[in-house]
Image: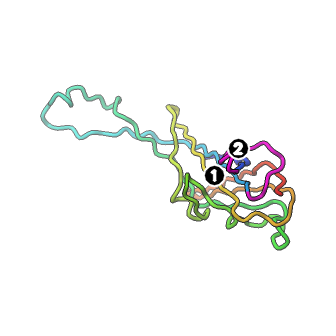
Amino acid sequence: MSFKALNLENTPQKRYVTSQKDTLEGSDYGIRLELKAMANRIAMRRSVSLFINTANALYCPQCAPANYVPEDSIASIQIIDLEKFDAEMTENTDVTSHFQVVNGTESLPVTEFKRVYPWFQFNNDNTGTALFNLVLKNPPQITGKHQFKLVLQTKNGVKIENTSPSVVLN
């Protein structure tokens, strides 16, 4: 499993749009996670009757529809500001509680992300992608440069880290 962290602009005119801007309003800032995962392909099997009927006469186990299951899943998400967040929170401080996970109209604390955890869209090569948005609900009181480190802990115990691009939050 791997991921990218992208800056996200969340204004009434641009809802959850990735942004290349160097400066954003703190109240409009978010982070989009693009998760990449490998999957195990599991063929869905139908029960086979002892008696041949028309449906089973054409049954092909290799042609059965596939169900893709991620090899691993996320157990927790942590967001750390590599810069000074505000007067009380110095650099390298956990600011996870200042963000929320947004899925459509539902907005929840990051610790509740499993309730809105997105479905992976898997390709024929058994790789899948999922997107979800972390929106800054309590922006810093100080204007300044920020860069966030995201730490994802998988259920298998693997820690995966990545950083968002730097951005100035007003």
Say which residue appears at 84% left-offset and 53% top-offset: 168
- In-front residue for pair 142/97: 142
Indicate the quadrant where residue 46 lies.
Answer: top left
- Span shown in magenta: 11-27
Report, in whole angstroms, how far the alpha carbon at label 2 lies from the one at label 1. 10 Å
Residue under numbered circle 2: 18
The circle on residue 104 is none
- In-front residue for pair 24/109: 24
Q: Residues within 10 Å of mark 1 (few under 14, many from 20)?
A: many
Q: Quadrant of the C terminus?
A: bottom right
Indicate the quadrant where residue 18 lies.
Answer: top right
**How many numbered marks are there?**
2
Q: Is residue 3 left or right of residue 128?
A: right
Q: Position of residue 35 (x, y in %)?
A: 61, 46
Task: Tell me the kind of residue under disc 2.
Answer: Thr
Q: Position of residue 80 (x, y in %)?
A: 74, 61
The single residue placed furthest to the bottom in the displayed view is 88
- In-front residue for pair 141/111: 141
Q: Residues within 10 Å of mark 2 (few under 14, many from 20)?
A: some
Badge 2 element: strand
**Above or below — where is 53 with respect to 140?**
above
